[in-house]
Image (spheres, rainbow, N blue to C red):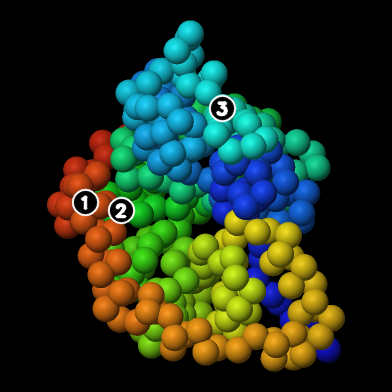
C-alpha cells in the first residue's frame, strides 16, 4: 500500500507556545521537535538591519516603545540590546542570524516561510535579504529553494519577482476571493487562515488549488480538532504554535489513520461564529483596509524599476 501523505509541520514563529515567538530559541525548538519548516516575520531597522519580528512596533513582546523602522539596531540604544518579556528572555534575532541557523549542516532540510509584512518597503527589504542570502556558500542550491516569501499585498509580487526571483512565493491571506483575484497567477502556494477554508467557498478554493497544482498552507492551527480537519481537507502544511502536539498527532495518524480521525468530530464548524460568512467577510474587509493603509491600494501601486539582481551583482 502507498503510504498516506499527511500535512507537514511548520512552526508558526517557531515553537512559539513554548518559547518567545520569533526568537532563535523558538526556531531551534521547532526544529528539535521535528518540524519540516519554520515561519517568521520581517521588518527593517532604521540602519538597514532585517529583523525577525511580527509587529511593526516593539512594545507587545519586548515592553519597549517605538516602531522598528524608526529605531536603530546598533548602538547604546539599539534594538540588539532588547530582550523579550516572555521567559526565557531572548534577544531579537536578525534575518542573517536566522539564515546562519538554517545553514548549519543539521538544519539544511528545514524550510523557511518569510512573512513579509506590508509596512516594509519591498525594494529595500528584498535587496537587503538578497545580500544576506547570496553571501552563503552554495546558496543557490542549499538555501534559495528552501525560502518561501509570504506576500499579503499585491504590490509586493512584482518586487519579489524582480529582486528575489529564485525564491518561491506564497500569498498569505484571509480571503479566498482576494487570493483568486490578485495572486492566482503569481504564486505557487496559498497560506490561508483556517476560517477562510472552512466555508463552502473554502471547499471550492481547496479543490481549485488541487486541480491547478497549488500547495495549501493553513494557519494558525493549534487545536487538535482543527488539525484533524486540516487533514481531512488534504492541505500540504499545518502552521502551528504547538509543533510537538501536531507531530504527536501526525505520528498517531500514521499508526491508525481511521481510528484517530474518528475521535475528532466536526461539530465546531457549525457552532463557531468565526466560521460563518459574516465573520469571514468582516475579517476580509478589515484586513484589506489594514493592508491598504500600510502599502497603498490593491489596484494602484508603483512597480519596481526594471533592474534585476543580476545587473545589481555585475
Q: Is 20 placed left or right of 180 in the picture?
A: right
Q: Where does residue 107 sit, x and y in percent of width and height?
A: 75, 44
Q: CA distance from mark 3 to mark 2?
A: 30 Å
Where does label 2 land, which residue? 153
Name the secondary structure under disc 1: helix
Residue 169 located left or right of residue 155: right
Q: Residue at x 46, y 16 (%)?
A: 78
The total number of labels drawn is: 3
Q: Which residue is mark 1?
A: 292
Given residues 60 and 121, the one toward you in this image is: 60
Looking at the image, tell me whether mark 1 or mark 3 is earlier in sequence order: 3
Residue carrying label 3: 83
Q: Earlier in the sequence, mark 3 or mark 2?
A: 3
- At 30% from the left edge and 74% from the top edge, which residue is drawn? 279
Mark 3 packing: few (<14 Cα in 10 Å), some, or many (20+)?
A: some
Quadrant where the image shows the N terminus: bottom right
Tell me which corner region of the image, top left, top right, bottom left or bottom right, holds residue 304.
top left
Q: Residue at x 25, y 61 (%)?
A: 286
Query: As drawn, is 256 to the left or to the right of 267?
Result: right
Q: CA distance from mark 1 to mark 3?
A: 31 Å
Front residue of 85 and 104: 85
Amino acid at each position: 500500500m502507498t503510504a498516506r501523505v499527511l500535512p507537514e509541520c511548520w512552526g508558526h514563529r517557531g515553537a512559539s507556545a513554548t518559547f518567545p515567538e520569533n526568537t532563535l530559541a523558538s526556531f531551534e525548538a521547532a526544529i528539535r521537535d521535528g518540524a519540516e519548516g519554520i515561519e517568521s516575520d520581517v521588518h527593517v531597522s532604521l540602519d538597514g538591519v532585517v529583523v525577525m519580528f511580527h509587529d511593526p512596533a516593539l512594545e507587545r513582546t519586548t515592553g519597549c516603545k517605538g516602531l522598528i523602522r524608526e529605531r536603530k539596531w546598533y548602538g547604546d540604544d539599539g534594538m540588539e540590546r532588547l530582550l523579550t518579556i516572555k521567559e526565557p528572555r531572548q534577544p531579537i534575532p536578525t534575518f542573517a542570524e536566522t539564515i546562519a541557523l538554517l545553514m548549519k549542516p543539521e538544519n539544511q532540510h528545514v524550510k523557511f516561510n518569510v512573512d513579509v509584512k506590508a509596512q516594509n518597503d519591498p525594494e529595500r527589504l528584498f535587496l537587503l535579504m538578497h545580500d544576506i542570502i547570496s553571501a552563503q556558500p552554495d546558496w543557490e542550491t542549499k538555501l534559495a529553494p528552501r525560502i518561501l516569501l509570504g506576500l499579503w499585498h499585491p504590490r509586493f509580487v512584482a518586487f519579489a519577482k524582480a529582486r528575489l526571483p529564485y525564491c518561491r512565493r506564497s500569498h498569505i491571506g484571509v480571503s479566498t476571493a482576494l487570493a483568486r483575484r490578485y495572486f492566482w497567477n503569481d504564486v505557487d502556494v496559498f497560506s490561508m487562515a483556517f476560517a477562510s477554508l472552512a466555508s463552502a467557498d473554502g471547499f471550492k478554493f481547496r479543490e481549485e488549488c488541487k486541480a491547478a497544482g497549488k500547495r495549501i498552507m493553513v494557519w494558525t492551527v493549534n487545536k487538535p480538532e482543527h488539525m484533524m480537519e486540516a487533514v481531512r481537507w488534504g492541505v500540504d502544511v499545518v502552521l502551528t504554535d504547538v509543533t510537538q502536539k501536531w507531530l504527536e498527532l501526525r505520528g498517531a495518524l500514521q499508526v491508525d489513520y481511521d481510528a484517530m480521525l474518528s475521535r475528532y468530530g466536526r461539530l465546531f464548524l457549525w457552532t463557531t461564529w468565526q466560521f460563518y460568512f459574516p465573520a469571514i467577510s468582516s475579517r476580509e474587509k478589515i484586513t484589506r483596509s489594514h493592508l491598504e493603509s500600510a502599502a497603498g491600494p490593491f489596484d494602484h501601486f508603483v512597480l519596481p524599476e526594471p533592474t534585476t539582481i543580476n545587473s545589481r551583482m555585475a
